[in-house]
Image (spheres, coloured by chain):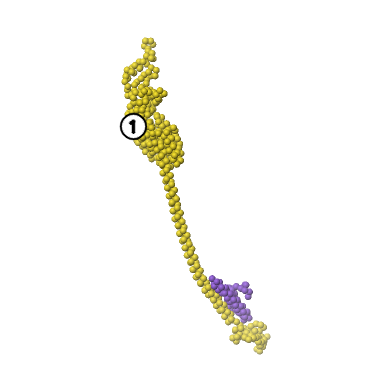
Chain colours: A purple, B yellow
Amino acid sequence: MATKKFNYNEAIQSIEQILERFRNEELDVDTLSEEVKRATTLIASCRERLTKVEEEVNKILDAE
Amino acid sequence: MPLATHISLGELQRRVKESLIERFPAPLWVTAEIADLKVNYAGHCYLELIEKGSHDSVPKAQARAVIWRSNYGALSTYFEQETGQRLAAGIRILASVVVNYHELYGFSLQIIAIDPAFTLGDMEQQRQQTIARLQEEGVWELNHTQPMPPLVQRLAIISSPQAAGYRDFMQELSQSPYAFHTTLFHAVMQGGGAEDSIVAALDAIAEHQEAFDAVVIVRGGGSTSDLNCFNGYRLCAHIAQFPRPILTGIGHDKDQSVADMVAHTALKTPTAVATWLVERMATLDGWLEGAALQLHDLLQRTMRSEELRLERLCQTLRQEARNRLTHHRLRLNQAGVLLPERVRDALRYEHKRLEIAQEAVESRSPQRILQLGFAIVRADGHALRSKEELCRHKLLSIELADGVTEIRNTKPETKN
């Protein structure tokens, strides 16, 4: 995923939507693996972003 | 007309003269007012004597009189010594006279003596009458109650321009450090015409009263002569009712004249009036100086107190600002402490969320389901969800955890 366009909130929303569909048993077995792969990727991206933000925040806070 | 019955003019005059001398053999004491008085080159004094009517205007009797030179010097000196009054028009006298008659000059009186006591009494009587009348008419105090302005600078002066007193007055003013604006109103200050002349001057000043702070009447240089007009009712009434305060320096050391009594301020001499004016100016000057000092003091005190106030305000402001800054700094400090905590909490929360999401996603992963021992049965690339579907296909693809295998359906429906 292109990091430039990455938007954490949108990614989280997408993940929530996929989870919602899981809960409602809306998912097709055929598309399931695709969705899981997508969700996993989004989660990884979010993690990455979160870790980066965390580092930045810590740097800023420690600089004070 | 019979000739025997007439006489000549000379004869008539002679007879008149004879009968007069016969009738008035000795000198007589006569009262009269001097209407006119002249001393000729030879030193003889010629007078017009009159007796006035009841209204002080039209004479009801008149006669010429003479005091011969031989008599005049001693007589007039004595008179002046006794009365403080020169023999002059306007005064009343009691004179010892000899009746004369001359064929050419007619009736006349030769004055051989004058009783000063009568004139004194008459003058005193006139003085008392003037006082009584002014008091009766309620004007006695009027000029006294005229306000004398603090600054007496514009002066209307009534005097004879040649008078020594006027010169003394002007000199005294000019020697002072103050500027006086003087306007001279000419007046005759002695003799019969003096009263009318001074009244006329007062009238002239009254027309421009706004231009003057006070009126000054000065006269003489201390010589005791002819003060009678200053006791006259007309002049004194004018002075008393004058709309500006009047100062007198009439120059005499006997009794005060009525004019002095009704004037706002009476002083002995013209110089004394000038001194009084200069002193009044000096008092005002001093007062102004004091006031200026007070003003200066007050200003300084006010400035100082205002400065103090500003300083106090400034301090308060600084303190207040410091308090606000401290307050904000404390809040920031608090925020500084809280921020990392909050941020970290938030981040932790996000991690948790992602973790939960991952678990949920993983639980749905087909790989995991296959590992649990489930299989996906496909035909023609589609997952089959029912027995019925299964019966329709001969060739099936089975996906297990470790791979896909193709099998032949031995129990296909034979319907088709």
* Image height of A59 relative to B195, above or below: below
Residue B312 in percent (x, y) is at 45, 59
Residue A54 in percent (x, y) is at 56, 74
Residue plotted at (42% across, 45% down): B286
Residue plotted at (37% across, 16% down): B13
Residue B63 visible to an observer of this rendering: no
User: Please, what is the three-letter code of the amino acid marked with disc 1?
Assistant: Glu
Front residue of this view, candidates B409 and B85: B85
Quarter placement of the N terminus of chain B: top left
Residue plotted at (35% across, 30% down): B81
* Image height of B237 relative to B66, above or below: below
Q: Which quadrant of the structure image shows residue B246?
A: top left
Residue B210 in percent (x, y) is at 45, 39
- In this view, which residue lies farthest toward the bottom? B410
**Which residue position is annotated with label 1?**
B124
Quarter placement of the C terminus of chain B: bottom right
* Image height of B108 relative to A9, above or below: above
* Image height of A58 relative to B312, above or below: below
At mark 1, the secondary structure is: helix
Front residue of this view, candidates B84 and A3: B84
| Label 1 chain ID | B
Q: Which quadrant of the structure image shows residue A16?
A: bottom right
**Category of crowding for the residue at label 1, using alpha-carbon neighbours closer than 10 angstroms: few (below 14), some (14–19), many (at least 20):** some
Front residue of this view, candidates B203 and A46: B203
